[in-house]
Amino acid sequence: MMEEIESAVNKAVEFASNIYREIEKGIRDRGRVTLLTTGWLKSPGCSAIHSISSVLSGVEAYHIDLGFFARYIAPYRSSIDSDEERTWLVIYGNPKDPWSSIADRLAKSLSTMGYAGIMLRASVNKQQISLDEIRVIDIPNNIDPILVYLISTTKAILEIASRENPSPRVARLATEITDLAPVIPGIFQRYEARLKDLADKISAQDLTLITTCTSRAFAEGLILDSHSYIDLLEITDLHSIDLLEKTIAILYVEAEKDLVPQITVLKRAIDIMLKTDPISSPIYYRILSMILSKMLKRR
């Protein structure tokens, strides 16, 4: 199983390494970047916002739903008339969004309005589209799109930071996300027992995943892998754990411990905390859900 995971991760790293410079150039050349996602797929935009805020100082970044932006914001933004101030877009396609064809039309509409940027999307059942100002990059069917979204954007941001604001943290992260396969056995060994617990609960359709920005990729990966019957909640939307009937799994990084309600010490709560940098954590959470998906498929 580990060989399959390592192969899948290596493919995503290789593909991301071939495209990230286009994202880097767009972010570097514009002072304002808008990250657009659709439906339940939010982790790429959330992750990018966090990375930009952490290591870049000269970029204004916003994460907005594609439909909301195209319908209610883009038509009324006069700033696109100025080449110096024009917003640059990164659009992340949702491979299992039932309205994916609408997303393509919205992207074309934005291009017609004069917006420039890049659209990354999984090529499953996708028709080729040509946009004047927005370059479309299709990710092959055999490569995980969520990993590509996360790795390519993070690499682009770290590339800019390494020139404009170099630091040991930036250098370490840039090296870390380029060679991910060696860490997979250690991740598996450390979290194997809890992943098996999650597999039991998912098989019984008895699981609610509570995620943060850094861990949402874990749940989205499971949905992408056709385990869509799990319940997914954002930790900041939670108002009462007592009302949840299913087993709870709460996923977060060490820096987010203050977000975790004390009531999660209940026996029915499965706790998965990563002691990793919040910038790279979404990538590791997706790798963990890839391992979990393999466990589920072997049952």
Image (cartoon, rainbow, N blue to C red):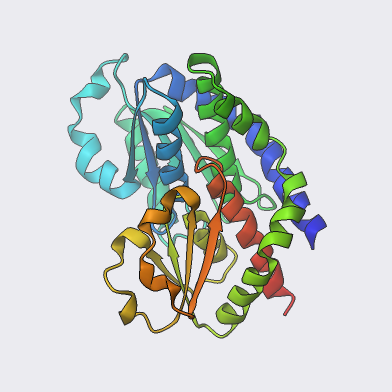
Q: Nearer the viewer, residue 299 or 15?
A: 299
Is residue 71 at least partly visible in the picture? yes
Q: Residue at x 48, y 80 (%)?
A: 268
Q: Residue at x 39, y 84 (%)?
A: 245
Image side of residue 242 versus residue 12, left or right: left
Residue 12: percent from the left, percent from the top?
Answer: 67, 44
Q: Residue at x 39, y 32 (%)?
A: 53
Quadrant for the N terminus in the image: bottom right
Quadrant for the C terminus in the image: bottom right
Q: Quadrant of residue 63?
A: top left
Is residue 123 at least partly visible in the picture? no
Q: Nearer the viewer, residue 172 or 19?
A: 172
Residue 117: percent from the left, percent from the top?
Answer: 43, 29
Number of callouts in the render? 0
Q: Residue at x 57, y 69 (%)?
A: 226
Q: Residue furthest right?
A: 3
Residue 239: percent from the left, percent from the top?
Answer: 26, 69
Q: Nearer the viewer, residue 112 or 57?
A: 57
Residue 255: percent from the left, percent from the top?
Answer: 45, 47
Q: Quadrant of residue 131?
A: top left
Image side of residue 202 versus residue 71, left or right: right
Image: 283 above or below 161: below
